[in-house]
Amino acid sequence: MAHRPGRVTSAKIVIAGGFGVGKTTLVGSVSEITPLTTEAIMTSAGVGVDDTRNVPGKTTTTVAMDFGRISIDRDLILYLFGTPGQTRFWFMWDELVRGAIGAVVMVDTRRLADCFAAIDFFEHRRLPYLVAINCFDGVQYHNADDVREALAISSDVPVISCDARSRESTKNVLISLVEYVLSMRRARATTPA
Ligand SMILES: Nc1nc2c(ncn2[C@@H]2O[C@H](COP(=O)(O)OP(=O)(O)OP(=O)(O)O)[C@@H](O)[C@H]2O)c(=O)[nH]1
Ligand SMILES: [Mg+2]
């Protein structure tokens, strides 16, 4: 992604994380087009498989992907691809991340372990990612350093808090990710091989 002023650049970003962490909510809150969603009603067949204890109002789940678009400024458009959270849909991840410049891994601090698989996936593919703590109402706040330590991720991976329902908040997350990706690319370009 070479960002040249005056020329419109587009980039693909993946929104990942565990089941019910707020991925579809994030894409929906920030997208300037009506997001494409692939929600299916959760039926009693999912009882015992899908853990909805921390998201009691949740009645649907993503079965393929979410898709949205946001213009960060006049010359940078981001295309957002939200992944399905349930592990039984993970066979689609390889396709979903193809061509992406980076990823947002959303976490709910009540269920931190749910994001391990996403982090492993991006680490393995060397795709830059940041961690966005989705602050659900009434949940005790954990600061970024504690979450970084609990996830055992490198000190340069950004960890930030957000509210997936707020456009401003999610836009901030995306801007932070773009800045991080650009800084990684600059660092790689200046490191002798
Ligand atoms: N209080 C609060 N509720 C949220 C927030 N984000 C999402 N929710 C609620 O949490 C539930 C899960 O949100 P989704 O956006 O469907 O989660 P998801 O990660 O896309 O879920 P899957 O695709 O099924 O893995 C919904 O009932 C949302 O209304 C948040 O920031 N705060
Ligand atoms: Mg979803």
Image (cartoon, rainbow, N blue to C red):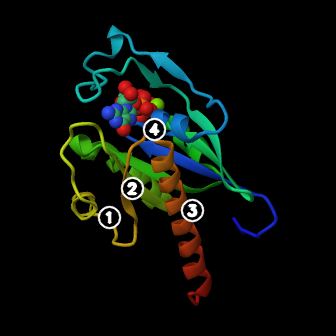
Q: Residue furthest left?
A: 140
Q: Is residue 158 left or right of residue 36?
A: left
Q: How many marks?
A: 4
Q: Residue shown at 21%/61% (left/top)? A: 146
Point out residue 60 in the picture as x, y percentages from the top left corner. Answer: 43, 19
Measure the C-alpha gap from mark 2 to mark 3. Answer: 13 Å
**Identity of the residue drawn at 43% across and 59% down:** 130
- Which residue bears the numbered disc 2? 131
Nearer-the-camera pick, 135 or 189 = 135
The residues tagged by marks 4 and 2 sit, at their Cα atoms, a distance apart of 12 Å
Of mark 4 and mark 1, the one earlier in the sequence is 4
Identify which residue, 65 or 145, lies in the foreground. Answer: 145
Disc nearer the start of the sequence (3/1): 1
Give residue 101's position: percent from left, percent from top.
60, 58
Disc 2 C-beta below 8 A from ligand 1:
no
Q: Residue at x 39, y 52 (%)?
A: 132
Secondary-structure class at tag 4: helix
| Farthest-out residue, right | 7
> In the figure, 20 relative to 128: above or below?
above
Say which amino acid is labelled 4: Lys
Marks 2 & 1, CB-CB < 8 Å contact? yes
Check disc 4: other Cα within 10 Å, few if <14, some if 14-19, many if 20+. many
- x, y percentage for residue 39? 51, 21
Q: Amino acid at mark 3?
A: Val
Q: Distance from label 4 to label 3 (Cα)?
A: 18 Å
Cβ(mark 4) to ligand 1 < 8 Å?
yes
Say if mark 3 contacts mark 1, CB within 8 Å: no
Alpha carbons under labels 4 and 1: distance apart: 21 Å
